[in-house]
Amino acid sequence: MSHYTTFEERLEIESGLRGGLSFGEVAKQVGKNRSTISREVRKYAVCEKLGSAAITYNACRSRVDCIKRHICTSECRKPSVKNCKLCGFCNDVCPDFEEQVCVSRFKPPYVCNGCEERSHCSLEKTMYHATEAQKKAEKGISGSRRGV
């Protein structure tokens, strides 16, 4: 019998995280140890620089109060946007850029899947996707079987 996490278990983990469950509650559903779930999530979670439905990615600490305009000029991928707070690409060239990182990503469950703020957050997100986790795991397993 294989001790690897199956795709179905990964789907249950993703669903539990989306529902805001703790690692212990997810572990009971899946039938594995909570530390196994924690390792699985931390190992296969991916960082995404996405905004949300109507908000572009912008991780600048002063994005809410920013009054700067047209900082990125010719390199701008959104030249129609006047205010830099509405353009996530200005983060790369603004001399006053100071990144804001969400502290929720550094404590359990380490991912933004079940975060209530996710729908209106413009910061970098850490997400657990079962399909991506399965692809990475299969790649790792086949790589370890190849040998030196």
Image: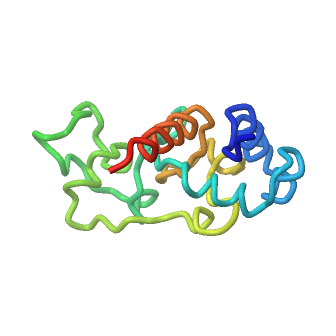
Closest to the observer, 76 or 3: 3
9 horizontally vs 142: left or right: right
Closest to the observer, 124 or 71: 124
From this viewpoint, which residue is outermost toward the front? 147
Instruction: Residue 60 in the image: state x and y as whole percent.
Output: 38, 60
How is colour applied across the structure in the image? Answer: rainbow
Instruction: Residue 2 in the image: state x and y as whole percent.
Output: 70, 41
Closest to the observer, 31 or 20: 31
80 horizontally vs 138: left or right: left
> Where is residue 37, by image quadrant?
bottom right
- Eyeballing the image, is 146 above or below 92? above
- Eyeballing the image, is 48 above or below 62? above
- Eyeballing the image, is 76 above or below 123? above
Q: Residue at x 65, y 68 (%)?
A: 107
Closest to the observer, 41 or 56: 41
- Eyeballing the image, is 78 above or below 115? above
Q: Residue at x 55, y 49 (%)?
A: 44
From this viewpoint, which residue is outermost toward the left? 74
> Where is residue 103, by image quadrant?
bottom right
Q: Residue at x 60, y 45 (%)?
A: 128
Instruction: Residue 3 in the image: state x and y as whole percent.
Output: 71, 47
Q: Residue at x 26, y 67 (%)?
A: 96
108 horizontally vs 34: left or right: left
| Image mark count | 0
